[in-house]
Image (cartoon, grey):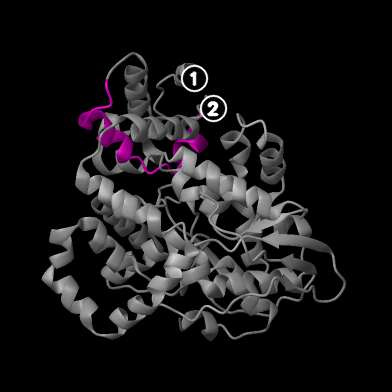
């Protein structure tokens, strides 16, 4: 870690791209300020509340990594530091309870599935408006209040088959990650992903026993937990040539397995192989090249750069090119695309005030595009921005890149995306 710390020359190029520095203008809430604190800790300063609050306030968006001219690996630094925080810093009982609840729920699709029925009943009962007006959840726990506000409308989640056959001549065979929140609360995204891949000539293998990839744990300093999820994912997808992922955070984590399991002799080579064959959906479709006919979709869309897609994976041009290749589609850019929307995995649950401020900023820039539809490639971003748009009184339908492509390839009307 000291060598990584020494790479920072404190030039300040990261400051305009750091969401928390943009919000508060505080040096200790900038990447170089946090690196200074990391160095202090390496020299013996304790991880006390005053220091830890600045690490907790970091979104881990990696915009600073993209903007850094010196190649500072802040992404590795914050992951290492968060693991140290979790190992060394005694959090309060309420903090521990909230974090434990989050990590006992979200990485487990079966538990999320069990939650859908009660959540559907609650959403249809008329209670949400009353609960929000009363402020009872805010007083009880800001995290619970954030979870209640962000919960998406529950939809029927049909189970995908273990194999979706290619249409026409087979060009490739790919494995597909279904995710956790994506699988249970955005089932249409997974269904659209499988259809698009099949229409482009891919046999799609969807292992039924797959589980969480470990992204939330990895990015929250729960290293042992992340490694356990990673080993299971590696084992599940051995034997396929390419793994296609439609969630930015998941794809980023899987591409990091090589580093995560580097010190495990039994898994290092297997993890390196999996990382090398992991592709984001847009990245893979760009590599494969189009074959299926694109039907017109006369709609104006604003494309949102998910941080773990743009900054962590470097996938920016491919989604835009895929959207621009649809006849009749007008793709508009969102101002300040490098600034995170505030979702950032569990950030909008653990830091709801800062997340709401960032969500409001993002919603304003989205609304300014005049688009009819927002396109995003991460479930957390979709929930975060949709809620912020609703809050400012400018609601907008949100779709995944896969859903837009699916509508075009199948000749569906634009209204199928706009009435959601």
**Position of 55 compared to 174: left or right?**
left
Please indicate, yes or no, whether residue 169 appears anywhere in the rendered image: yes
- Residue 59 in magenta stretch: yes
Residue plotted at (67% across, 50% down): 235
Tell me where the magenta segment starts and ends, as one range: 46-69
Residue at disc 1, secondary structure: loop
Residue on which the image places disc 2: 71
Which residue is disc 1 drawn over?
7
Which mark, by number, is residue 209? none
Q: How many marks?
A: 2
Residue in the foreground of this view, choosing between 166 and 373: 166
Q: What residue is at 62 percent from the left and 60 percent from the top?
A: 177
- Residue at left 31%, top 71%? 390
Q: Quadrant of the C terminus?
A: bottom left
Above-or-below relation of 122 to 271: below
At label 1, counting other C-alpha atoms closer than 10 Å, the crowd grade (few under 14, some 14-19, many 20 or more) is few
Q: Quadrant of residue 32?
A: top left
Residue 45 location (% of width, % of height): 28, 18
Using the image as rendered, state which of residue 4 and residue 179 is in the foreground: 179
Q: Where residue 129 sits: x, y (%)?
A: 20, 78
């Amino acid at each position: 870690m000291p060598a990584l710390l020494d790479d920072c020359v404190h030039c300040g190029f990261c400051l305009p791209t750091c969401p928390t520095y943009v919000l508060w203008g505080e040096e200790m809430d900038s990447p170089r300020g946090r690196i200074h604190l990391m160095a202090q800790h390496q020299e013996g300063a304790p991880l006390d509340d005053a220091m830890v609050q600045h690490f907790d306030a970091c979104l881990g968006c990696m915009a600073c990594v993209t903007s850094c001219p010196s190649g500072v690996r802040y992404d590795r630094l914050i992951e290492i530091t968060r693991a140290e925080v979790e190992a060394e810093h005694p959090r309060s009982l309420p903090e521990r309870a909230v974090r434990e609840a989050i990590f006992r729920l979200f990485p487990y699709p079966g538990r999320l599935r069990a939650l859908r029925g009660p959540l559907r009943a609650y959403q249809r009962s008329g209670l949400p408006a009353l609960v929000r007006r009363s402020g009872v959840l805010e007083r009880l726990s800001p995290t619970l209040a954030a979870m209640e506000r962000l919960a998406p409308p529950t939809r029927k989640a049909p189970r995908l088959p273990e194999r979706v056959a290619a249409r026409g001549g087979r060009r490739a065979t790919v494995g597909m990650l279904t995710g956790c929140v994506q699988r249970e609360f955005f089932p249409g995204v997974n269904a659209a992903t499988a259809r698009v891949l099949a229409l482009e000539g891919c046999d799609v293998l969807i292992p039924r026993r797959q589980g969480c990839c470990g992204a939330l744990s990895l990015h929250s300093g729960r290293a042992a937990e992340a490694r356990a999820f990673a080993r299971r994912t590696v084992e599940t997808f051995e034997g396929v040539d390419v793994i296609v992922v439609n969630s930015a955070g998941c794809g980023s984590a899987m591409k990091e397995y090589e580093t995560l399991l580097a010190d495990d002799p039994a898994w290092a080579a297997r993890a390196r192989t999996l990382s090398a064959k992991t592709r984001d959906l847009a990245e893979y479709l760009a590599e494969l090249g189009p074959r299926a006919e694109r039907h017109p979709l006369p709609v104006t869309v604003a494309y949102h750069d998910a941080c773990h897609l743009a900054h962590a994976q470097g996938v920016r041009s491919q989604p835009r090119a895929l959207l621009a290749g649809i006849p009749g589609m007008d793709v508009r850019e969102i101002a300040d695309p490098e600034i995170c929307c505030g979702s950032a995995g569990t950030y909008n649950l653990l830091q709801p005030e800062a997340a709401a401020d960032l969500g409001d900023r993002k919603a304003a820039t989205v609304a300014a595009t005049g688009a009819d539809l927002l396109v995003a490639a991460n479930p957390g971003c979709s929930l975060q921005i949709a809620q912020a748009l609703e809050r400012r009184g400018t609601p907008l339908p949100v779709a995944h890149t896969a859903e837009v492509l699916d509508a075009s390839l199948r000749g569906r009307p634009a209204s199928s995306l706009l009435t959601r």
